[in-house]
Amino acid sequence: MIDIAPAPALHAIDEDAAWEAFHARDRSADGRFVVAVRTTGIYCRPSCAARRPRREHVRFLDSPQAARAAGFRACLRCLPDAVARDRQAVAAAIAAIDAAETPPPLDRLAAQVGYAPHHFHRLFKRATGVTPAAYARARRTARATQALAAEPSVTAALYEAGYAAPSRFYADSDQRLGMAPGQWRRGGEGVSIVWTVAPSSMGPLLVAMTERGLARVAFEDDERALSQSLPAAELRPADTPTRDRIARIVTATEAPDPLLAEPARRLSFIEAVSRALLDAG
């Protein structure tokens, strides 16, 4: 066994959970801690594909820096030192999308953070659960609902939200508003909405649907905000089959990287659930 200097490990209460994440190769644990193996002198990210050592040969350390200070060296297979850089790149791309008036293309985003487009696309989706384009679509949808409430006309709202042409906005409104933009501005006039609240890994999630699409998906535990934003709509609780179907989809959706900013995590999760609901029909 290689002689390794002592180093601060995670609190003992966390070690069972850390071992479970390591044993399961849980990608969401990458960056939260590193796994140092005494018999090899190497430290890895939790999701490393290498064969699992015996538990008594493993230490869980808070960071690559702590592992290096203790005399371990980085695994050349999983490259644990790259986790922080990957997360910073995803966070920078999220900030760029949030700040852009129109969704930036993948090539530009990847170039800004120094990655090849295909690799960055995969990296972004692994961290957030959605693609860069899907995250940008979710951001634009959020802006569209705000603009519809604030702007003097639908036309002004669509350009304020970042749409380049009315046709795309009206095409999106069916799925993303569940109704025509004019109906949304009139408080859901003439629209019937079914709603339910489903438990998720990030908290209670309200899902409200029409025959055309999604009227609202938000982290809320009742229908009050839905009723306030669409006071002219007919609201009905979802029946049991619909409620169960939505709950299965929400429960199956994985939470984004816990170390990303909370607003980005919430928007990504909402988009992932929305896409799954729309795909399910």
Image (cartoon, rainbow, N blue to C red):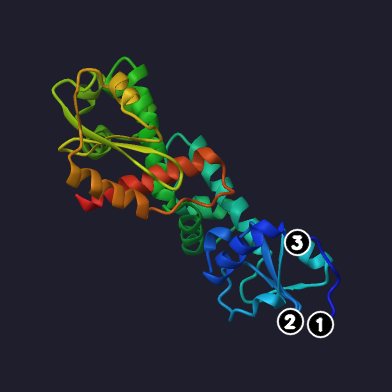
Which one is nearer the viewer's eye here, 239 or 45?
Answer: 239
Query: Looking at the picture, how far across and down is residue 227, in whole percent?
Result: 28, 22
Q: Amino acid at mark 3?
A: Ala
Residue farthest to the front?
13
Quadrant of residue 184 in the image? top left
For mark 3, give the secondary structure: loop
Q: Which residue is mark 2?
A: 40
Q: Quadrant of the N terminus?
A: bottom right
Quadrant of residue 187 in the image? top left
From the viewer's perspective, is residue 162 above or below residue 109? Answer: above
Q: Amino acid at mark 1?
A: Ile
Describe residue 50's horizontal placement relative to residue 249 as left or right.
right
For mark 2, give the secondary structure: loop
Task: Answer with mark 2 or mark 3, whichever residue precedes in sequence.
Answer: 3
Which one is nearer the viewer's eye here, 36 or 266?
Answer: 36
**Which residue is found at the position 83% from the left and 68% from the top?**
70
Mark 1 Cα shell of 10 Å, populated few (<14), some (14-19), many (≥20): few
Q: Which residue is mark 3?
A: 9
Query: Looking at the picture, how far across and down is residue 137, in whole percent?
Result: 37, 42
Q: Which residue is mark 1?
A: 2
Q: Is disc 2 in contact with disc 1, using a CB cutoff of under 8 Å?
A: yes
**Which residue is found at the position 17% from the left and 38% from the top?**
212
Q: In this view of the protein, can residue 55 be seen by the observer?
A: yes
Q: Amino acid at mark 2?
A: Thr
Task: Answer with mark 2 or mark 1, whichever residue precedes in sequence.
Answer: 1
